[in-house]
Image (spheres, helix red, strand yellow):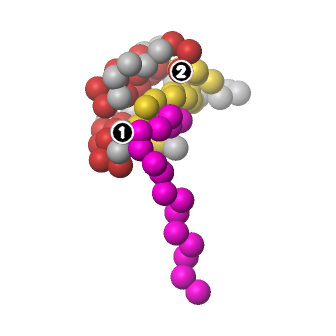
Amino acid sequence: MGEPNAPKIEFPCDYVIKVIGDSAPDFRDFVVTVVETHAPGLRETDISVTESSRGRFSSVQLRIVATGEAQLKALFAELKASGRVRMVL
């Protein structure tokens, strides 16, 4: 039996990204700067930050307008290549 196909995303659409990394005073601003280069027009209401219970990690959640797979792949690749991001969901 083959794997089921992933659901197709119809672009453009609202898309939520969660970026997890080591806590640092500038982590949120770093993530927002990278995301803005790929998906301009973020609003403050589209960004939320959560700290882990021990304060070691930060999670930045953002709602963007995704325009296509190429945009999302480039965004994920840049975040992961930074060395500051542990996981992008």
Residue 87 coordinates in the image, percent (x, y): 48, 43
- Tell me the quarter of the picture where residue 74 sits: top left
* Span highlighted in magenta in the image: 1-22
The mark closer to the camera, 1 or 2, is 1
Q: Which of 39/83 is in front?
A: 39
- Residue ranking furthest to the right: 53
- Assess disc 2: are there few (<14), some (14-19) or many (≥20) residues with their C-alpha within 10 Å of its C-alpha: few
Residue 38 coordinates in the image, percent (x, y): 31, 31
Mark 1 touches mark 2? (CB < 8 Å): no
* Residue 70 shown in magenta: no
Query: On the picture, is 28 further left or further right than 80?
Result: right
Residue under pointer 2: 46
Disc 1 element: loop
The residue under the point 43% across, 19% down is 42
- Assess disc 1: are there few (<14), some (14-19) or many (≥20) residues with their C-alpha within 10 Å of its C-alpha: some
Instruction: Give the amino acid at mark 1.
Output: Thr
- In space, the residues marked 1 and 2 are separated at their CA atoms by 17 Å
* Residue 4 shown in magenta: yes
Residue 89 coordinates in the image, percent (x, y): 52, 44
Number of marks drawn: 2
Residue under pointer 1: 67
The residue under the point 58% across, 86% down is 1
Image position of 88 with respect to 50: above or below: below
The residue under the point 38% across, 19% down is 41
Residue 9 coordinates in the image, percent (x, y): 48, 51
Query: On the picture, is 68 further left or further right than 49?
Result: left
Disc 2 element: helix
